[in-house]
Image (cartoon, rainbow, N blue to C red):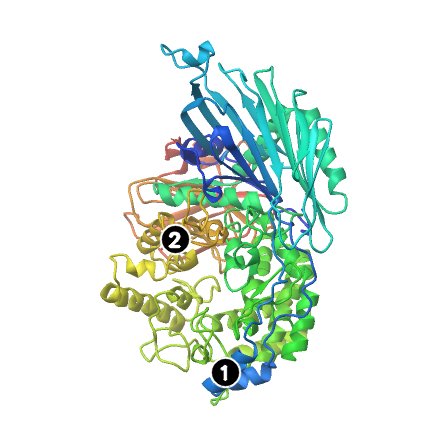
Amino acid sequence: RGILPTLPDETMTTVWNRFQMDPVEYLDRHHGMVNREPRSWWHDGCPLGNGDMGVMAYGPPESSLFLFGKTDLWDARPFGEANYPSAGFAALRKVAQEMDARGFRELRERDRGRTRDDAPTIKPGGMLRLELFPSSKIMGFEQRLSYAHAEVTETWGLAGDRKPSARRYSSMPQPVVMTSFVHAARNVMAIHVRTGDHPFHEPVCLSLWRGEDPDMVAPEAKVEKSVGWIRQELPGGKPVVLMLGSDSEAFDFFEMGGRVFAKGRVPTETLTFYITLETGAEALTKARENIADARAAGFETLRETHRAWWHRYWERSYLATPWPSVEAKWYQALYLHACVQRPGCMSPGLQGNWIKENYPAWNGDFHNNINIQIVNWSYFTANRLELGEPFYRLYHGVLPRVTEDTKAYFNMRGARYPISMGPDGAETCSGQFLSAWFGSSGWLAPHFWWHYQYTGDLEFLRLYAYPMIKAAAQFYEDYLQEGPDGRLIAHPSVMMELMAACVEGFGTNSIWDWPVVIRTFQMAGEAAAALATDAEDRRRWAEILPRLSPLPATAEGVWKEFSDKPLLHMHQWEFAKFMAIFPMGLVGEDFGPEEWREQARRTLADHFAYWREHGDTPDACYRTIAGFGMVGPALARMGMGKESLEYAEMACKDADSFGPAGFVCNRSTHCVQVDTPLMMSMFLNEMLLQSYDGVIRVFPAAPAGDGALCFHSLRAQGGFLVSSERRQNRVPYVVIRSLLGNEVRIRNPFTGEKDRAVQVKIYRLEEGLDFRKQHQIPAMLDRLYFPGDIISFVTEKGNLYLVSKEIPWYVNVPQLTVE
């Protein structure tokens, strides 16, 4: 479980659901990745991973390619001094406040060329090439990535050789089948080939290598009996070893030109390769052990234990909807999450653990102005909270370095996290003002707070969350200044990256930054109160909150980019205006000050009205806010179900942005990113279940439709697991498991009924309870509720509860089989 005091892997029994669904079979039947033709581009291949080791499988059978990566495979040289502007922060702030364009240009000229080549960079792990039946005609090729089993299966037939089986035209011969997976709990990849009717009539050849890097020592190739490996010393002194072995004695291994080669005539109908990738001082020893253990276990045993892990993962929580493209991205995002994030492993950067370039775009680093945040949104409601452990460990681990850098450059307390960084936490951004942007700390801290809210883990709050939140609040205390009206303001502030390279891009209290500041002081007070600590700080933070300037808005109540500038309509950064709704959670459809709620509604109305008139495409209203997917949840939180679904479907079908593997990539882009694909579960999370303010909302933004909706064991804040379904646009029941014994507060889910008010009953669920004898079962609560009412009741830790309605009665809801 890494640094997590407790492992939040709870799930809920399916006994009380009125729908039956096998999530593994459902996922295998409906979702996955299928290629009818071999993929020649590595980023279009099939991604595999276990949170540490990652593999991309691509290419045709006669040249099957496997790209290896690892989340901790970094150029580990110390970066040294943080890459802040050479001018002190006071000078930079003065230029921005005076809008001194000439002074700003002079500062830029002074720092021209300040981009450093020694920034930490994630590195590729190496390549494997298999040549299977290179002289044959390949027919009927299919490559299938199963999310359910986390394995790639390739099948193909052969023609064009002298063997009778390949010239049999009256019946189709059994195909060749190649199955590969990265084991869920071991750093081993298994590749298993079954020849079917096609024996290995020519030698099988392979090659193993790591590409040479001009800034690194050349890799060394070694062979020893039936294994071969590539070893290289990364900058900073960390060794990396890529090793391969087989279950066949037919191979002769040899080294040539810094690569490992093997060739052999295989007499059996099956062949298995085992490959491992390890880093660190004991890399070679661990690699040897991995190969030996894999050989001893054998392919079938490895596959069985691998599948068992993934099946448990999928049984944790699941859903079914009538929206196939959005549902597909929900499952794909959770699959990719488990491939790149696991407790105890390194937190993934922009490209995860699928790295081919020596120098990927932006060094594959950690971008803290949205990219790393969206990687860590989906798993909360989806009930996979343990996936956040690498994120928490990384950012808590660099807190001392960040605190020192903040004091040295800003002369302020607390922690200002870099806008971009490597694993050491040093600022690497070369932008003149972005490298001194203040918003990242308050952007990162909520993720720690959410983990506490969903789990109730006080030890996590004390050890990891509160130090982050407190450091952010201390920094903002020192960063804020008193405005002309006596209210506190933040200047200079930026609007995402809009015009951040010129002085005109600075302003006061951007709608991008200011909600972060407000939420930070709210969190700090709430966290300190939960721990009963820092009474003086809590008092001071409580006094600061009413002194903060309001959210920047026009006279008509529409949020604008800066409080000191007129409203702009920005095509590329329009999504940034909705930060207060999501993810900061200051306001929602029925939450937050009424003034803010009205501003949120007017801002959304203004946005849609403007872009319907000025957009160059019919869906311009959505494309202008498509950036990074964050507006879909904002629309859902404002109860705009129709718009939320339209936005989600547009984003999920955006072929211009996403490649076949789901990554942000197309043939004309210079980068490969996994950040946005990992957040795509948020669309359904927020449409089906919300709890951001402690009130459970079931189907709060699911638009009306004929199809049935159901979900099992999603997680709500306060420590609750929730299952429910909707049929004919009505919710028949909700099942809740209380993990902590907290009070349940749930917005009346029984809307759309014939009568405006609904008779609601709450039952404590116990084993053997027979609801066919309903009159013999006492209800904990039995009363009338209107739409929008909050139903509340006390729970006991570990118990389950049924929220039902009088008509139709719970047992009169027909059992639904989801296939």
The answer to whether one can see residue 535 in this image is yes
Among all residues in the image, which is located at the extreme left? 613
Question: Which image quadrant for residue 766?
Answer: top right
Mark 1 vs 2, N-terminal side: 1
| Image side of residue 422 versus residue 24, left or right | right
Residue at which label 1 appears: 104
Left/right placement of residue 62 relative to residue 422 reads left
Q: Residues within 10 Å of mark 2 (few under 14, many from 20)?
A: many
Q: What residue type is labelled 1?
A: Phe
Secondary structure beneath dot 1 equals: helix
Measure how far apart labels 1 and 2 are at the Cα level.
48 Å
Q: Which residue is drawn at 55% across and 82% down?
A: 92
Counting from the top left corner in percent of width and height, residue 817 is at: 40, 30
Q: How crowded is mark 1: few (under 14 residues within 10 Å), some or many (20 or more)?
A: many
Residue closest to the eye, 221 or 589: 221
Name the mark on residue 256: none
Q: Could you say whether the residue bearing mark 2 is in a helix, strand or loop?
A: loop
Of circles 1 and 2, the one toward us is: 1
Residue lying at 57% horizontally and 49% vertically, measured from the top left: 385
Residue 536 can be seen, yes or no: no
Residue 725: % across, % down: 40, 41
The residue that appears at 58% across and 55% down in the rendered structure is: 451
- Specify the amino acid type for callout 2: Pro
Where is residue 618 drawn, in percent x and y? 24, 57
**Residue that carries the numbered disc 2 in the rendered image:** 700
Task: Check the image and report above or below for 187 versus 457.
Answer: above
Give the farthest residue toward the bottom.
484
